Amino acid sequence: MTDQEILAGLAEIIDEIAGVPADEVTPDKSFVDDLDIDSLSMVEIAVAAQDKFGVEIPDEQLKDLKTVQDVINFVSKNS
Amino acid sequence: MPANEESAGTGARVLAFGGYQPDKVVTNDDLAKIVDTSDEWIRARVGIESRRVARDDETVADMAEAAGAKALAASGLTPSSIDLVVVATCTPEVQIPNVSATVAYRLGITAPGAYDLNAACAGFCYALAAASDSVRAGSARYALVIGAEKLTSWIDWNDRSTCIIFADGAGAAVVGPAGAGEPSGIGPVVWGSAGDMAGRITIPSRTGSLRQDGQAVFRWATTALHPVALEACVRAGVTPADISAFVPHQANLRIVEAIARKLGIPRDRVADDITHAGNTSSASIPLALSRMAEQGRLQPGTPALLLGFGAGLSYAAQVITLP
C-alpha cells in the first residue's frame, strides 16, 4: 500500500466519521488543531482504519498519532 | 402443588413500563461552575444537555418504588398479582437488606420472591431475562422488574470525565404470561461478559468513587456490541429493519449512535433519552422506554431491541414485543 493509498483511505474514513471533507485531509494536518477531531472520534477512526487497512492501532499508540502523516507512517510501518 | 404450575410452558411478555426521575435538574452550565468543563464540550462528547440528581435523603428504594408503582398502575394489575420482584442496581446504599423486598412491601405486593441483581448498566436486560424465564418456567406468574440507581452518590464531583455523565433515576416493567397460543413477547437473551476488562469501570472501595477508562470502554462499546444486538435479532426471528424502537443503554449518545449506525437502524427509531436523563446505568433502558411510551413513540405489537452493557464488563440484549 502506498502512502497515497493510505491517505485516500484515511480521508474516506475521516469524512464518514467526523464529516471532514476528504480534500481537507492532507498529511500535515493535526487531528485536534486543524480538523477539530476529538479523542473519541480518534478511537472510531482507529477502529475503522483497522477494518480498512488490517492494522491495529491500540489506545496507547493512538495518543501519539497527532497528524495525518503520523497515521500514514504507523499504518505503512505495521502493514 | 406450586401455585404457578398452570403457567409453565407459556410465553412471557412485557405488559407495561414506568419511570421515575428525581426533581432536581442539573444542567451542563451548573457543572461548569464546579469543574473545568462547558456545555459545548459535554454535548459534543456525550450528548447530555441536563441530568437529574436525587435528593440526599432520596434512596435507590424510593426511586425504585416510584417507578414500580407507575408500571404497576399502567399494567392494570393489583399488587397482589405480582409474585416476583427483581431490582437491578449497582448503587444501593447498603448491602443488607436488599432493595427489592423493601420496594415490594411498600407497593403492597404480598410476600413475593424478591432479589437484587448487579450486572451494572446491563442489569435491566439481565433482570428482564430472569423474570421472563421465571414466568416461562412457572416459577412466577407476574413479575415486577426494576432498574434503579443513585450513581451521584458514587461520583467524584472533581472528576470531570465522570461527573458530567452519571445521574439518578429508575425504570420498571411488568412481565406476565403471553396469551394462550401466542408467541413469547420477550425473545431469547444474548448475554455475556468480558471479565478481562473488569478494571476499566470500577468503584474500587466502599468509600471510593466511580472510575472509568473512557477511551477503552468507548472502543469496546462501539466494536463488540452490535454483533450481540444482531444475534438477539436473529434469535428472535427478526432483522434490524423490523425493529421499531432500538433502546440501548444510554451510556453516551455517541456510543448509541455508533451502534445504531452499524446495525443500520434509522435515527428516528433510536432512543436518545440520555440528552435529558444522563447515564442512569440499569435504569436507563426502562426509563427511556417509559418516556417513549408517554410520548407515543412506541408502536404496540411491534418489536423493540434492548441492549444493556457496562461495568463487569457485562452485556445483554433481547427483542421484546412492545405492550
Image: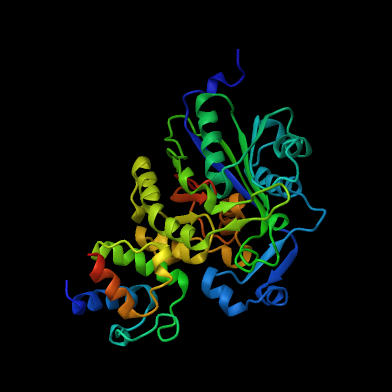
Above or below, B1 against B263 in this view is above
**Residue B187, position in %: x, y?**
43, 40
Residue at left offset 40%, top offset 49%: B229
| For residue B310, side relative to residue B153 (left or right) | left
Can you see residue B20? no
Residue at left offset 37%, top offset 79%: A19
**Residue B46, position in %: x, y?**
54, 68
Can you see residue B137? yes
Quick one: B191 or B177, which is closer to the camera?
B191
Residue at left offset 57%, top offset 24%: B139
| For residue B234, side relative to residue B209 (left or right) | left
Residue at left offset 63%, top offset 76%: B37
In the orientation shown, which residue stands out farthest toward the right? B57
Quick one: B75 or B253, which is closer to the camera?
B253
Above or below, B48 against A30 in this view is above
**Residue B202, position in %: x, y?**
59, 51
Quick one: B300 or B109, which is closer to the camera?
B109
| For residue A49, side relative to residue B57 (left or right) | left
Q: How many marks?
A: 0
